[in-house]
Image: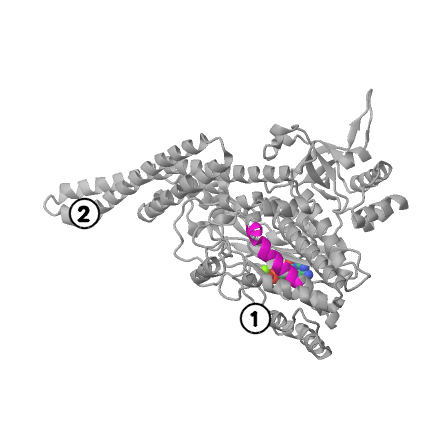
């Protein structure tokens, strides 16, 4: 009997609804209450230390030891007043999680007594063991030790009575072992390049920040059902399960009312998010049943990335209270939409100008065009790398499935902006423009804001879409770290901005007027990046055909194939030229990516084989025996007619035998394929082998299990079914 499944269902049916109390206070009263913000710092730090931290944030300056001691002591005073007992460096290793190692403020004294302490040294640097985190061989070639170092540009916060200090994580030899280190370097690089370009338009600009607004999609599932699905608990996705008779066909989930238990969960995590200064703005249902989304107001990119990873942790923790589990996997269920994490990306100056929003004057609009075409050019030259930055085993189930961007990069600008780019390309020439021509072009460019106002066309099928005042990168997976694509986008745009400045300067040197030099360079970029612009349906087969044959755009065919982009000389140069990652770091990351890919498939394959052997096949055989008994009984009672009477049963007995045979044989073959792969020394060869030789079995075996699910008595089926998993009561 299907004990586990029915126990889970019974538990849910008996579940009493717990009323939750939510604060009736205004959010603004407690927003950021658990964060050591600049505002809070002012109360806890001497002026010198406070000014020092401010300039460290603004100018990426180091904080000296004396000041670090003052900050540590202020932080400790604030945190202990708020009930914190421990502190921890909080960082983002290369496995899409966050890591913490808690130490107590409490210090027992020799001979009795105790006190609370936190020194500058401990604030600035700690030494977690690097060998227990993915390090891509850096452990073998170098020292095992690594250290985490305080990132003053992201504020410390308190969670579960622990003061968390956002940090970078690097090997002892200096190589980055995390997402934050190269992200910070890419932000510094784009700041420098963008400021130089801005200076062509406005001398007051001396700082350019990247802004990021992410949209986090996720699924919720009842905890009892989750625990009864070993595939969900061990791999984060269902490895089997026939589609429910009704899922998203009626499109009745999207923007529908949110069930009370779910909205209580949302309010609960939102409350803590607000206390931690995460500016959440929207929450709604998504396309698939039990799928939801939340999005904050955009923030400076480093902080936005920290907030996203922090929120994922809070959501996981809060879900337990509501007897729910959050699934961040990109594709927990076959046949319904998967989850992504759109990254809305833009640039903002210290003067408060969004460089991707058209302004009021023609000059502002030429500046807008400069950044706009530089970003398009970046996607053109480094699109493949952008796709590689979000490639992962879990995201591969979602991409290209007519619900998420295809595996080829394109940029959507909207037809009117596209026409404007075409017109600039046509009208601007290398020759000196007449005053009339200049006026005409400026008039044209002046119309951009109006164009955008009523340019409401939105293309949901494009991986990189311009949405009025930002670019939206839609290929990012829901479980990934936004820093990964951001590092690539920042690096690629930095490269284009540097080139832009060089080319404009060279033209000016030749005697071309500044305005014309800028327009001519814009035109060059428009021409060079033309074939990445696409306004049509990105999900259509015709597009992939056109992109690859007519336009010569590269697609990625498999995940290990995508990873290879990281080691292409042109792409490596991008990172090394701008000081974002060294060749050693890129090799290490490449290794980690391939290793993680192999491990994920290995685990899935093991779990599937175990479930097939221990749960599915015995259940199918039991049911088959019931049918056999039935046929025998019929034969006893109706010896002359039973063959006709039991024709369907006999057929089913055979069908079950066939499915069972297929599952057994293929499970064995899958194990053999794994063995071959495991003997491969080279991690890249192993990843390719797992991708082409092991992974296909997962689908093949599942197909037959799902067929059995349709045949076998519902009372006997051991695992919760899709129709149960995809409902929250
Ligand atoms: P949609 O689902 O239509 O894409 P949402 O409102 O859910 O729109 O999300 C839009 C996201 O874009 C939000 O996270 C928002 O903060 C972000 N955003 C808006 N303006 C900018 C900007 N200038 N830079 C970065 N992100 C932005
Ligand atoms: Mg979006």
The residue lying furthest to the top in this view is 111
Q: Is residue 123 left or right of residue 521?
A: right
CB contact under 8 Å: marks 1 and 2: no
Judge depth for marks 1 and 2 and give the one in front.
1
Name the residue that disc number 2 marks.
646
The prevailing secondary structure element of the residues shown in magenta is helix
The residue lying furthest to the bottom in this view is 436
Q: Residue at x 48, y 38 (%)?
A: 687
The quadrant holding residue 212 is bottom right
Answer few, some or many: residues within 10 Å of disc 1's Cα (few below 14, many 20 plus, some between 14 and 19).
Answer: some
- Which element carries disc 2, helix, strand or loop? loop
Name the residue that disc number 1 marks.
415
Task: Assess whether residue 386 is covered by the magenta stretch.
Answer: yes
**Highlighted magenta segment, given as a residue range:** 372-387
In the image, the residue with mark 1 has its CB under 8 Å from the nearest atom of ligand 1: no
**Picture quadrant of ligand 1:** bottom right
The quadrant holding residue 126 is top right
Q: Is residue 400 left or right of residue 440?
A: left
Q: How many marks?
A: 2
Quarter of the picture holding the N terminus: top left
- Which element carries disc 1, helix, strand or loop? helix
Can you say whether 216 is above or below 540 in the image? above
The residue lying furthest to the left in this view is 640
Image spot of residue 329 (x, y percent): 52, 47
Task: Assess whether residue 573 is covered by the magenta stretch.
Answer: no
Query: Toward the viewer: 147 or 594?
Result: 594
Answer few, some or many: residues within 10 Å of disc 2's Cα (few below 14, many 20 plus, some between 14 and 19).
Answer: some
Query: Toward the viewer: 196 or 66?
Result: 196
């Amino acid at each position: 009997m299907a004990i586990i499944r029915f126990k889970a269902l019974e538990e849910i049916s008996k579940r009493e609804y717990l009323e939750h109390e939510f604060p009736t206070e205004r959010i603004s009263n407690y927003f950021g209450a658990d964060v050591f913000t600049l505002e809070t710092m002012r109360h806890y730090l001497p002026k010198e230390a406070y000014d020092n931290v401010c300039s460290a944030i603004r100018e990426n300056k180091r904080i000296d030891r004396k000041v670090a001691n003052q900050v540590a002591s202020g932080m400790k005073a604030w945190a202990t007043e708020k009930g914190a007992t421990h502190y921890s460096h909080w960082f983002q290793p290369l496995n899409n999680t966050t890591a913490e190692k808690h130490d107590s403020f409490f210090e027992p004294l020799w001979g009795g007594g105790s006190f609370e302490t936190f020194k500058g040294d401990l604030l600035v640097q700690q030494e977690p063991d690097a060998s227990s985190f993915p390090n891509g061989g850096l452990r073998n070639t170098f020292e095992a030790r690594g250290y985490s170092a305080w990132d003053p540009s992201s504020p410390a916060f308190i969670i579960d009575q622990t003061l968390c200090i956002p940090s970078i994580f690097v090997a002892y030899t200096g190589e980055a072992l995390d997402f934050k280190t190269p992200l910070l370097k890419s932000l510094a690089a784009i700041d420098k390049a963008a400021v130089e370009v801005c200076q062509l338009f406005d001398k007051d600009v001396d700082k350019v920040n990247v802004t990021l607004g992410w949209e986090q999609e996720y699924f919720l599932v009842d905890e009892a059902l989750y625990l009864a699905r070993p595939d969900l608990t061990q791999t984060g996705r269902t490895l089997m399960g026939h589609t429910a008779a009704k899922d998203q066909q009626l499109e009745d989930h999207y923007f529908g009312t949110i069930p009370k238990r779910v909205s209580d969960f949302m309010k609960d995590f939102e409350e803590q998010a607000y206390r931690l200064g995460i500016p959440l703005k929207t929450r709604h249902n998504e396309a698939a049943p039990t799928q939801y989304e939340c999005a904050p107001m955009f923030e400076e990119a480093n902080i936005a990335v920290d907030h996203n990873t922090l929120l994922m942790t809070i959501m996981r923790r809060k879900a337990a209270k509501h007897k729910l589990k959050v699934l961040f996997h990109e594709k927990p269920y076959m046949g319904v939409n998967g989850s992504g994490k759109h990254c809305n990306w833009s640039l903002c100056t210290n003067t408060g100008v969004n460089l991707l929003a058209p302004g009021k004057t023609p000059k502002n609009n030429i500046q807008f065009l400069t950044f706009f075409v530089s970003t398009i050019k970046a996607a053109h030259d480094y699109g493949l790398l952008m796709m590689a930055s979000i490639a992962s085993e879990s995201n591969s189930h979602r991409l290209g499935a007519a619900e998420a961007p295809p595996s080829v990069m394109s940029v959507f600008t909207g037809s009117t902006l596209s026409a404007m780019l075409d017109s600039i390309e046509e009208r601007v020439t290398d020759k000196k423009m007449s005053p009339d021509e200049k006026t005409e072009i400026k008039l044209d460019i002046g119309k951009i804001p109006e164009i955008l106002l009523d340019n409401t066309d939105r293309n949901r099928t494009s991986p990189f879409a311009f949405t009025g005042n930002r670019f939206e990168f839609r290929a990012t997976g829901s479980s990934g770290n936004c820093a990964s694509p951001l590092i690539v986008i920042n690096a690629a745009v930095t490269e284009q901005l540097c080139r832009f400045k060089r080319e404009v300067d060279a033209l000016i040197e030749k005697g071309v007027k500044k305005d014309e030099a800028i327009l001519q360079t814009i035109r060059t970029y428009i021409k060079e990046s033309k074939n990445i612009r696409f306004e049509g349906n990105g999900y259509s087969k015709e597009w992939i055909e056109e992109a690859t044959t007519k336009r010569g755009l590269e697609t990625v065919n498999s995940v290990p194939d995508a990873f290879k982009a990281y080691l292409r000389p042109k792409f490596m140069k991008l990172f090394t030229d701008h000081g974002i990652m060294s060749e050693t770091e890129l090799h290490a990351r490449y290794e980690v990516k391939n290793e993680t890919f192999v491990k994920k498939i290995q685990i899935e394959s093991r779990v599937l084989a175990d479930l097939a052997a221990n749960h599915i096949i015995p259940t199918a055989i039991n049911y088959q025996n019931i049918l056999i008994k039935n046929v025998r009984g019929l034969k006893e009672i109706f010896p002359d007619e039973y063959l006709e009477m039991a024709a369907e049963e006999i057929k089913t007995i055979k069908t079950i035998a066939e499915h069972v045979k297929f599952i057994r044989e293929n499970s064995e073959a899958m194990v053999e394929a794994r063995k071959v792969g495991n003997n491969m020394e080279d991690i890249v060869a192993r990843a390719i082998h797992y991708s082409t030789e092991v992974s296909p079995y997962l689908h093949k075996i599942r197909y037959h299990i799902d067929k059995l699910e349709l045949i076998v008595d519902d009372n006997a089926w051991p695992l919760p079914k899709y129709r149960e998993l995809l409902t929250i009561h």
